[in-house]
Image (cartoon, grey):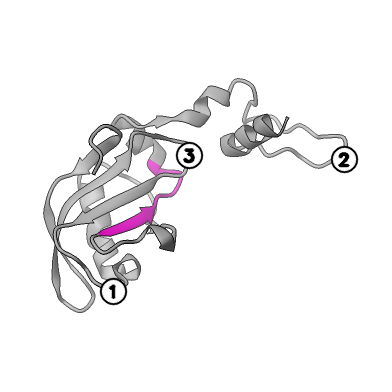
Amino acid sequence: MNNDTDIQLSGPFRVTDATGRNHDIKAIRIFDEGYGIIDVYVDFSAAIGKDRLYADKVLIGHILARLRQIGYVGPDFGHGDLGLQDDKLVVLEAPEEFNAFAASKGWKNLADEFADEFPEDSAVNDDAGTAVSSSKLDALKNKFKA
């Protein structure tokens, strides 16, 4: 963990996977800022080996229950990029609804800086007649293309 850029959402707790094995989790954390899609890092106390725990619905259910216990209200998560999974780490990709909860814990959405330049509630057509996306991330991409 990098304490300078992490927000710890939960301390240690124990979960069970679909095979009935127990796993000790050290922490659930997120980075303190990002551009809309939040990766949620679940740090395990011991190596989980080659187990694909990021896809274990029972284990993920226990992690989501913990997040809901501390205030998250919203849909379930999917696993994050497979390249991010590690021997003692499961990375989950949170849905957009998680952003409000993360912000309440101190997370900063860097895309908000560009919201004034690209209002979300209006669609603008470019010369080719295609609608420009109103999402903040697309607004950011468009800004850097110019």
Residue placed at 60% from the left, 37% from the top? 135
Figure disc tally: 3
Q: Residue 133 lies in magenta, yes or no?
A: no
In the rendered image, the quadrant that contains the N terminus is top left
Residue 114 located left or right of residue 26:
right
Residue farthest along the top direction in this orientation: 116
Examine the image and state in which quarter residue 50 appears: bottom left
Is 97 a magenta residue? yes
Query: Does 50 sit above or below residue 81?
Result: below
What residue did someone put label 3 on? 36
**Residue at 35% across / 69% down in the picture?**
55
Determine whether, in the image, residue 30 is placed left or right of residue 36.
left
| CA separation in Å, label 3 and label 2 | 28 Å
Q: Residues within 10 Å of mark 1 (few under 14, many from 20)?
A: few
Give the quarter of the image for residue 61: bottom left
Amino acid type at image mark 3: Gly
Mark closer to the observer (1, 3) = 1
Q: Looking at the image, is mark 2 or mark 1 earlier in the sequence?
A: 1
> Would you name the residue on which mark 1 appears?
50
What range of the chain is rendered magenta? Answer: 89-98
Q: CA distance from mark 2 to mark 1?
A: 49 Å
Residue receiving disc 2: 128
Give residue 49's position: percent from left, percent from top.
24, 71
Coordinates of residue 52 in the picture (x, y in percent): 32, 72
Q: Secondary structure at mark 1?
A: loop
